Image (cartoon, grey):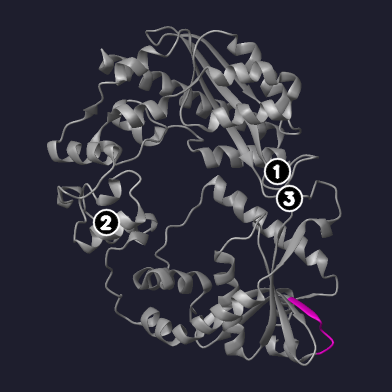
Amino acid sequence: MRYINKTAFINYLSCRTLGWMTKRGALPRFAGLNNKLLTLEGKNVHKASRQLFPDAVNAKILKADNPALDIGDLISNTDIKTIYDAQFVAGGFSVKADILQRLEDNLWRLFEVKSGSKYKVRYVSDMSFSAMVLAKYGIKICKTSVLHLSNDYRLGMDISRLFTELDCTEKVELKVQEFLSLSDKAFEDIESENMPQPYLKRTCKNCPLFDECTGKDVKNHIFDLPRLSILAMEELIALGADTIDKVPDDFELTEMQKVVKNSVLTTTNYVSENLKIEIENIKQPFYYLDFESVTTIMPLYPNIAPHTQLLTQFSLDKTDNLGNILNHYEYIADPTKDCRREIAEKLIEYLGEDGSVITYANSERISVSKLSMTFPDLSDKLNKIIERIVDLELIVRKNYYDIDFRGRSSIKKVLPALIPEMSYAGLEIGEGGDAAAAFAFMAMGLYDNARIEETKKNLLKYCAQDTLAMVRIHQFLISVAK
């Protein structure tokens, strides 16, 4: 029998249909490199947390060695003070408790281990579900704490400095009572043979099942209106306006939302009067810059905090006004060390002092700014580069709209609409998260030399595709502006 787990229950709280579907394994499965990295790092963090409790017993291992062993035997054995990875089933619900610590008078303390470096609201819901199942099992939890990563930790420090404890007892106690009162109804709905009827609400927008549920076969959904506020979204839903053509004429929209609505109603693309001016303000020679970076939970190198974003490579195309590539520069870091200074020096060398530095989105500007703060002796030259940066995405967002953008302006949405012959589909690495994960695996020493060289080639191809995409999009806008 498959019991109702934490994900199904929490999803049920936001949408009964989503909870029902989750229980039946309908959520999409992520199998890319990025997901593998998250899974690996999550396991490593949990493994590290156990070193804080040297006397703890591993319930999972004990169960594997002795299948007849019941978790109740461990709970009743007062010689056992701390248990981790214990699976509890009660009332049709199932949960694995990260760490349980025995206190006095048959009371227990629950620890949940999180890979984040700061408190998140969802942590309380996670712990409250665990505490609810434990309460149904008969275990009295009197204290609950989150163990999350400390920003003060550095590679090589004692593992005790990796974690920060945050007491969430009061918040969890309130939430547990709420969960207990909802649990019978949740069990009935989730276990029902009939799927609860879905209905449109604002949480549908980011639902992984949206395209197969309330968004199925719906063209020009109101969620395609860019930066639609929660209040506006709820008002439109209440009016029964699920598509853009149903938005009332007197409904208050931003200027960009009006542009999108008009494009949908007239089936025409939008070109602003200001596009020509913005395009002419971009100065030759044109430099197109794209960074890739990696952010790992545990530090890859000394003097780096958990969750620090590190630049790992860049692609740089220099072109004339016709889009002809005059020079292509590329760099990828040595995965065994932090190469940010070398990246900063190469940028200064390759970019010179003239011409616009064209990026897509604001992340490159932020990255160069961080390099400037990290290396004060290079800050003057780096700050001059920042002054030359032109955000091509911002130009697109303000001045051009194609209904195939569906309210988005990211390069992965804009490129196929404007330059359909270009695609990332044939690349071995074709997504930013996977690029970061591939570099992390090299830095962790998980790839042999042959695979490292092959991975580097694939990473360089992916990054080069991003700068080439910017070249083509820029040329498209030039032609439109004329």
Instruction: Determine the residue positioned at 56% across, 37% down.
Output: 435
Dominant SS of magenta comes to loop
- Determine which residue is flagged by label 3: 151
Verify whether residue 117 appears in magenta: no
Give the distance between the C-alpha atoms of the residues marked 3 and 2, in whole angstroms: 41 Å
- Determine which residue is flagged by label 1: 446
- Determine which residue is flagged by label 2: 215
Q: Which residues are magenta?
A: 78-83
Q: Quadrant of the C terminus?
A: top left
Q: Amino acid at mark 1?
A: Leu
Above-or-below relation of 149 to 481: below
Q: How many marks?
A: 3
**Crowding near pointer 3: few (<14 within 10 Å), some, many (20+)?**
some
Question: Sequence-wise, which precedes: disc 1 or disc 2?
Answer: 2
Q: Are marks 3 and 2 in contact (CB under 8 Å)?
A: no
**Crowding near pointer 2: few (<14 within 10 Å), some, many (20+)?**
some
Query: What is the secondary structure assignment of the residue under circle 2?
Result: loop
Query: What is the secondary structure assignment of the residue under circle 3?
Result: loop
Above-or-below relation of 80 to 400: below
Give the distance between the C-alpha atoms of the residues marked 3 and 1, in whole angstroms: 25 Å
Q: Nearer the viewer, mark 3 or mark 2?
A: 3
Q: Amino acid at mark 2?
A: Gly
Question: Sequence-wise, which precedes: disc 3 or disc 1?
Answer: 3
The x, y position of residue 66, in whole percent, is 72, 82
Q: Amino acid at mark 3?
A: Asn
